[in-house]
Amino acid sequence: MKKHNLGKSRLQVSPIAYGFWRFGGTDVKTARTKVETALEMGINLMDHADIYGVDGGGQFGDAELLFGKVLQEAPHLRDQMVLGTKGGIVLGVPYDSSGAYIEQAVDNSLKRLGVDVIDLWQIHRPDFLGHPEEIAATLTKLRNRGKIKEVGVSNYTPSQFRALQAHLSFPIASHQPEFSCWAHEPLRDGILDQCLELSVTPLAWSPLGGGRLAQTTGDLADGPDKNRLINLLKVLDQIAEEQGKTRTQLALAWVLQHPAKPIPILGTQRPERIQEGAGALDVTLSRTQWNAILVAAQGEPLP
Ligand SMILES: NC(=O)c1ccc[n+]([C@@H]2O[C@H](COP(=O)([O-])OP(=O)(O)OC[C@H]3O[C@@H](n4cnc5c(N)ncnc54)[C@H](OP(=O)(O)O)[C@@H]3O)[C@@H](O)[C@H]2O)c1
């Protein structure tokens, strides 16, 4: 995979990332296979968060700990990757971006991952009580001390992004919103426009709608969005058939094709599906096809 700079930083990242939200269990061999498969496919950007583990029935920090065990067993893998993680979600609070908390979160992630430096440290969600000046001073300190290389945000609004950027002397490298043909708000909420304006790399979380876009239509649960989703899946299937690709490859290609060059973060835990996801880079959608997918997703024509 051809690498490019993450935002204006010097980090060289693949156009597709691998994410660790669903990374669980205790078996280091299975965990290592997932990481190695991603790296073999040319995927070098790894997206963690300190809280990953909790949603899989585990504990805060479990995904980072398991990943740390993989790196302990195979230390040579560390140099092949751009290691990203996030912090700032605290169970029961639920957000804390105070300087003291961020410093502690970074130290704890470094320990769990067993590394000297985090390549990309991201604020997981905005903390309304966090002052951007204090956040920026803390991130600058951590960067100057060599604990983190670059900074990103996730789930920020464009104005929250701008407020933080105003207090930093270096550019924020990435912004991570949910973005897929199912969750396409970043097209219009200003996030992708801001990424284009400031040369920030968008990282697209849940690029398959958290698995919705991979479902068979017969299995869909009833709900107000059911018919719209069925229609979207039909349109994706039709174009996939024309192109000789899979539906999930089409859905990922739709994300990849936005001019801001969003990096879809694959969430599958199955090595063969990591390989399938990498195949999305071979898909080119025409403007008509890209728009047809958007129209099906939003359930109404473009004006
Ligand atoms: N910043 C944030 O707030 C935030 C929030 C959520 C996620 N994220 C990031 O985004 C990453 C991806 O999120 P996600 O896991 O929801 O991504 P996703 O790719 O949209 O969904 C992955 C889910 O789809 C399922 N799936 C079913 N068929 C599939 C197929 N053919 N190919 C691929 N997957 C298939 C996977 O199951 P199998 O494992 O069985 O394949 C998995 O449960 C996370 O790991 C995390 O790094 C960030």
Image (spheres, rainbow, N blue to C red):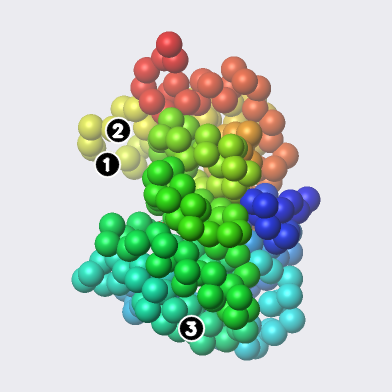
Q: Which numbered disc covers residue 107?
A: 3
How many neighbours does mark 3 have within 10 angstroms: few (below 14), some (14-19), or many (20 or more)? Answer: some
Q: Position of residue 180 (x, y in %)?
A: 48, 40
Tell me which residue sits at (62%, 78%) in the image.
146
Residue type (three-letter) at the residue carrying disc 1: Ala
N-terminal-most mark, 3 or 2: 3
Q: Quadrant of residue 59?
A: bottom left
Q: Is residue 208 visible?
A: no
First in sequence, mark 1 or 3: give its number. Answer: 3
Q: Position of residue 13 (x, y in %)?
A: 69, 57
Which is more toward the observer, 214 or 136? Answer: 136
User: Are discs 1 and 3 less than 8 Å apart at CB?
Assistant: no
Q: Secondary structure at mark 3?
A: helix
User: 255 or 30: nearer the eye?
Assistant: 255
Q: Is mark 2 within 8 Å of ligand 1?
A: no
Estimate the x, y position of residue 54 in percent, counting from the top left.
34, 72
Q: According to the image, label 1 marks what residue?
A: 221
Indicate the secondary structure of the residue bearing disc 1. Answer: loop
Secondary-structure class at tag 2 = helix
Please identify, in this view, whether the residue under mark 1 or under mark 3 is nearer the observer.
Answer: 3
Queried on whether the Cβ of the residue with tag 1 lies below 8 angstroms from ligand 1, the answer reads no
Residue lying farthest top?
A: 303
**Quarter the C terminus occupies:** top left
- Left or right of 57? Residue 203 is right
| Residue 68: quarter of image | bottom right
- Give the number of marks: 3
Q: Residue at x 57, y 25 (%)?
A: 290
Question: What mark, if any, has residue 226 been given in the picture?
Answer: 2
* Residue at 45% in and 55% down: 164
Cβ atoms under marks 2 and 1 closer than 8 Å:
yes
Q: Amino acid at mark 2?
A: Lys
